[in-house]
Image (tube, grey):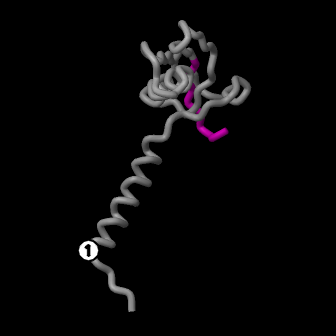
Amino acid sequence: MMRITPGCCASLLVVLAFFFSSAAMALPKVVHHHDVEHCRFLGKVHGSSGHGRHHGHGWKSIAKHRALVKGKKLGATHVVWHNAKAIGAFNGVVDGRAYACKSHH
């Protein structure tokens, strides 16, 4: 017979808390402009990689992540990238447009 221990229950609670917090923390989905034709435009989002080397992470992924976080704060479900510009060898900026869509594309 299997015994349920307090440690087992605590572990399960940690896993469930992580699962639900991850879902709540989901960033907007990156899509093409034709995917947001019936969505509400919320605003422009901008992300910068900051300055310096990024320990093996490309500047573009850092800048995009920061822009997606801004989109999430606006209530966006989707983001369309508009522009990405390198600034030197290790840094850059991205611009996008944030949308709220009723149905998920």
Q: Position of residue 44 (x, y in %)?
A: 53, 16
Q: Position of residue 53 (x, y in %)?
A: 46, 18
On whether residue 103 falls in the magenta region, the answer is yes
Residue, x 28% and y 71% (percent of image)?
A: 7
Q: Position of residue 70 (x, y in %)?
A: 45, 24
On whether residue 101 falls in the magenta region, the answer is yes
Q: Is residue 51 visible?
A: yes
Q: Check the image and name the residue furthest to the left.
A: 6
Left or right, 62 with reference to 97: left
Q: Check the image and name the residue furthest to the bottom.
A: 1
Q: Which residues are magenta?
A: 96-105
Camera-nearest residue between 10 and 21: 10
Camera-nearest residue between 51 and 34: 51
Q: Quadrant of residue 5?
A: bottom left
Left or right, 69 with reference to 37: left
Q: Amino acid at mark 1?
A: Pro
Say which element carries label 1. Answer: helix
Residue, x 57% and y 26% (percent of image)?
A: 99
Residue, x 55% and y 24% (percent of image)?
A: 58
Q: Check the image and name the residue furthest to the right.
A: 34
**Count of numbered badges drawn on the protein:** 1
Residue, x 42% and y 13% (percent of image)?
A: 51
Q: Is residue 74 visible?
A: no
For the N terminus, give its image quadrant. bottom left
How crowded pointer 1 is (Cα within 10 Å; few <14, some 14-19, many 20+) is rated as few
For the C terminus, give its image quadrant. top right
Q: Position of residue 10 (x, y in %)?
A: 29, 66
Q: Check the image and name the residue furthest to the top.
A: 88
Identify the residue under disc 1: 6
